Amino acid sequence: MVAGAPKIRTALIEGPYKVTGVSASPSRNRIFVCRPSTVADETGCARRILTNLTRRAYRRSVTASDVQAPLDFYNQARQSGEPFDAGIRAGLARVLSSTSFIYRMESDPADAKPGTAHPVSDVELASRLSFFLWSSIPDDKLLDLATSNQLRQPGVLAAQVKRMLADKRSDAFVSNFTGQWLQLRNLESKVSPDLLMFPEFDDNIRKGFRRETEMLFGYILRNDRSTMELLTADYTFLNERLAKNYGIPNVYGERFRKVQLTDPNRFGLLGHGSILSLTALATRTSPVFRGVYVLTTFLNTPPPPPPPNVPALEESNKGKETTAKSVRDQLELHRQVQPCASCHRVIDPPGFALENFNSIGQWRTAMDNGAKIDANGVLADGSKLSGPIELRQAITARPEAFATVITERMMVYALGRGLEPADMPVVRRIVRKAGQNNYRLSTIVNEIIASAPFQMRTRLEPAQKAQQSLQAQLGKGE
């Protein structure tokens, strides 16, 4: 028991005892698609198991030579006196060490000219699609369509995208994309509020922050709702612990559920503890961090990096005679350092608009020292702000800009590379298409998948191939 809410310090789990054999599990059942009843049946069953494994692991139709390599490992294990299961384990190890499993290989047609683009095969497209939406390999249904060259038939690809988004495995896309775009993956490493100031904060709240944001994104995606709802949603997803942190009543239990919000200051991502805690320090809020985050993540207008040797906020005010009580007062002094003033005029206003939220996302009307909070500011375009409501209105006033940010970040995620100038016409076309459909998030996903960068590849010049090969070798330490 520590100060604040009661917490469990340690827990001990013992057992089970006297376990024999290997328990059945879903993963073992997927591997062992057959069981030999006699010794004579073992080789045939092993071949069937390894054929199924190589097809799924290599994400394509497999040849006899593909299967023979792991089968040789199986035979060596059996000849050494190992049981059937150990032989399959040896064969599986060979499959998992194959370059066909480790790398997503894509080939060029023999007649493709260097520097020209061509569509990837249906099998390659299936892999691109599954790693985009599931962060994993294609399932049997998707792979069957690809190997029979049906994936690009009218309506088939769109139907598969809809099926895959509805599947639980798309949680990986929700978690990984929001982790990358909104930096939620940094919550564990960067959010550590001072426990003397926030004794009620613990890892349960930290994980709850991330789950709340992921559930909002997933709900909007799967229910065919507008991208703008990420900022304007008058609902969120909470359990009792997180609702208590926000001061929202009548939410009980550990289960996260959709909760209607009554305070418009809390609407959308700008009211989520995940973002508010990520952009704060351990002992205080940071209008600078929050301002940079809003400009970069929601408006795609990142400020330039600070000049070298610019002192931190506390350092720049050190030794000055001042009665500054609030962070805003300290920043006003900081702006007197001439290299800082021009950038802070752009950065600070969005951060000041969120000053009513403390370091763990709780609403407050005054600083801990009693200083009054001033949430007023003026954006670079002249828009006046006074709190999160007006900041949200300023961002949503240009829906195409917000949709462009998400489209760009999602294309980077889907393609696994940064965007180039040649990609920008595609981005603008996707945003226009989404605008005709109320900027629905699902429309952006579908249009990215239908785009040329996602469905095509360019055959490299010989010199480029040699350079990529050299880079790959250097990356392996060869």
Image (cartoon, rainbow, N blue to C red):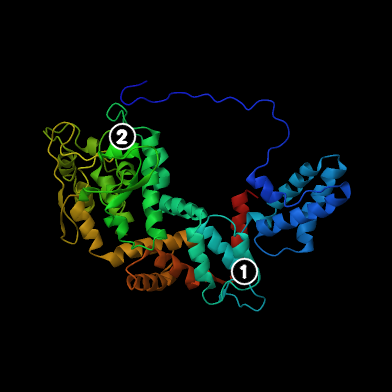
Does any portion of residue 243 appear in the rendered image?
A: yes
Q: Residue at x 18, y 55 (%)?
A: 390
In the figure, 37 relative to 2: above or below?
Answer: below
Compared to residue 443, the image places residue 239 above or below, namely above
**On the picture, is 4 further left or further right than 78?**
left
Q: Is residue 169 above or below residue 429?
A: above
Tag 2's secondary structure? Answer: loop
Q: CA distance from mark 1 to mark 2?
A: 51 Å
Q: Is residue 303 visible?
A: no
| Farthest residue, direction top | 1
Query: Which label's residue is closer to the chain start, 1 or 2?
Result: 1
Which residue is drawn at the image coordinates 48% and 71% (left, top)?
A: 450
Task: Tell me residue 453's x, y (percent).
Answer: 49, 70
Horizontal side, residue 377 vs residue 410: left or right: left
Judging by the rendered image, the residue that carries numbered circle 1 is: 146
Residue 139 higher or lower than 125, as above or below: above
The x, y position of residue 415, in whole percent, is 49, 63
Give how far across and how far down residue 427 sits, in percent. 39, 69
Q: Residues within 10 Å of mark 2 (few under 14, many from 20)?
A: some
Q: Amino acid at mark 2?
A: Ala
Q: Residue at x 42, y 50 (%)?
A: 179
Q: Which mark is residue 83?
A: none
Q: Which residue is mark 2?
A: 282
Q: Amino acid at mark 1?
A: Ala
Q: Secondary structure at mark 1?
A: helix
